[in-house]
């Protein structure tokens, strides 16, 4: 788990893109347990974040994420580099809903959720993305309102949603909503491409690290192949492991010792008298065999 020392705004009381709003004062924070979240509201990929250090400032709620880097090894880096820079409340349980005009802000067409809590708060690249805020549930997870349906309906009547909308503004609103919808629908595809690219770069970095360790005689090539599989996507852990293995200096192959040139000039008898035959045999067995053959007209027996 990795704590990111950066605050995210989880929610405020403004009107969201679906035309309704969640009152921060009505957030039942104690019911948000455990305070977890996913990546892009995709529960199937596992829990991505746990929120901590909740802080209210005005009508905004802030918190700090602790990233589940064992499941999402690159997520912390994506946050630090700004690819994932927002939070989005998801699966909202509405405990009290008001349609009273007195509770509405200018331009608000949907209800005011006065008491509520989320089941999860995801890390996202686009805050308020589709299907995150569009539905309101009761405590038994029954859908109370599906406000996303307006934005998913290509034949929607904007006058029904925005009664004060001027005719000359309708085309621009449709263009904006269509672009926003297309951007949200393409987010998953872009995220997958980004994840694939990061995974490829991580594999290349692991391979370079292992190749260097082999060159420094820290590990063998066979060990490098095993580590490449075991530590895929775990560069920091691999670096820590390799740093504990000392580099070894290559040991040069020693040149075979040769008998002194003076020994080559002596006869067998001279070598024998001087007690040099054992030395010659040890240091230059080929010359020893030559001297033996010259003296005895035969080759020496090998031991």
Image (cartoon, rainbow, N blue to C red):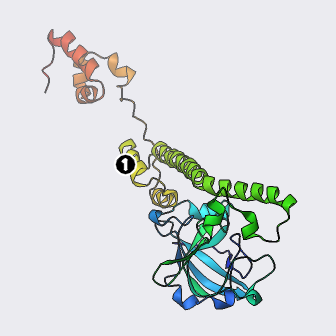
User: Residue 62 or 212: which is nearer the viewer?
Assistant: 62
Q: Which quarter of the image is occupied by the C terminus?
A: top left
Q: Nearer the viewer, residue 49 or 91?
A: 91
Q: Residue at x 59, y 86 (%)?
A: 116
Residue beneath the point at 45% across and 83% down: 140
User: How many numbered badges does the structure rendering display?
Assistant: 1
- Is residue 167 visible to the viewer in this orientation of the structure? yes
Residues 270 and 28: in front is 28
Residue 127, by quadrant, is bottom right
Residue 282 point in image, percent of width and height: 26, 30
The one of 117 and 86 positioned closer to us in this rendering: 117
- Drawn side of residue 264 relative to residue 200, left or right: left
Q: Is residue 108 above or below residue 191?
A: below
Q: Residue at position x 81%, y 59% from top?
A: 170
* 107 lies left or right of 294: right
Tell me where residue 229 appears, x and y as whole percent.
40, 50
Q: Would you say residue 219 is visible in this rendering?
A: no
- Give the percent coordinates (x, y) of residue 58: 76, 88
- What residue would you read off at disc 1? 226
Residue 227 shown left or right of residue 156 in the figure: left
Q: Relative to 2, say whether 26 is above or below.
A: below
* Badge 1 density bin: few <14, some 14–19, many ≥20, Cα 10 Å: few
Percent of width and height locating residue 188: 57, 55
- Secondary structure under tag 1 reads helix
Q: Is residue 159 left or right of residue 281?
A: right
């Amino acid at each position: 788990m990795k704590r990111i020392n950066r605050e995210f705004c989880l929610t405020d009381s403004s009107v969201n893109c679906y035309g309704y709003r969640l009152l921060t004062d009505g957030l039942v924070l104690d019911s948000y347990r455990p305070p977890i979240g996913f990546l892009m509201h995709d529960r199937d990929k596992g829990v991505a974040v746990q929120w901590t250090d909740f802080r209210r400032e005005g009508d905004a709620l802030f918190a700090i994420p602790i990233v589940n880097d064992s499941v999402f090894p690159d997520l912390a880096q994506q946050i630090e580099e700004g690819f994932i820079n927002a939070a989005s409340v998801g699966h909202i349980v509405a405990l009290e809903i008001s349609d009273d005009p007195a509770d509405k802000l200018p331009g608000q067409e949907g209800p005011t959720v006065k008491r509520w809590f989320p089941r999860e708060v995801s890390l996202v690249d686009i805050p308020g993305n589709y299907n995150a805020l569009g539905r309101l549930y009761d405590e038994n997870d029954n859908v109370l309102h599906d406000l996303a349906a307006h934005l998913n309906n290509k034949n929607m009547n904007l006058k029904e949603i925005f009664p004060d909308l001027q005719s000359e503004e309708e085309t621009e609103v449709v263009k904006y909503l269509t672009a926003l919808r297309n951007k949200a629908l393409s987010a998953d595809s872009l995220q997958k491409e980004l994840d694939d690219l990061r995974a490829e770069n991580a594999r290349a970095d692991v391979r370079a690290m292992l190749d260097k360790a082999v060159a420094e005689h820290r590990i063998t090539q066979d060990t490098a192949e095993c580590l490449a599989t075991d530590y895929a996507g775990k560069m920091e852990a691999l670096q820590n492991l390799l740093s504990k293995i000392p580099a070894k200096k290559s040991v040069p192959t020693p040149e075979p010792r040769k008998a002194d040139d003076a020994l080559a000039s002596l006869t067998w008898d001279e070598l024998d008298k001087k007690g040099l035959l054992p030395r010659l045999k040890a240091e230059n067995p080929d010359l020893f065999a030559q001297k033996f053959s010259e003296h005895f007209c035969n080759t020496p027996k090998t031991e």
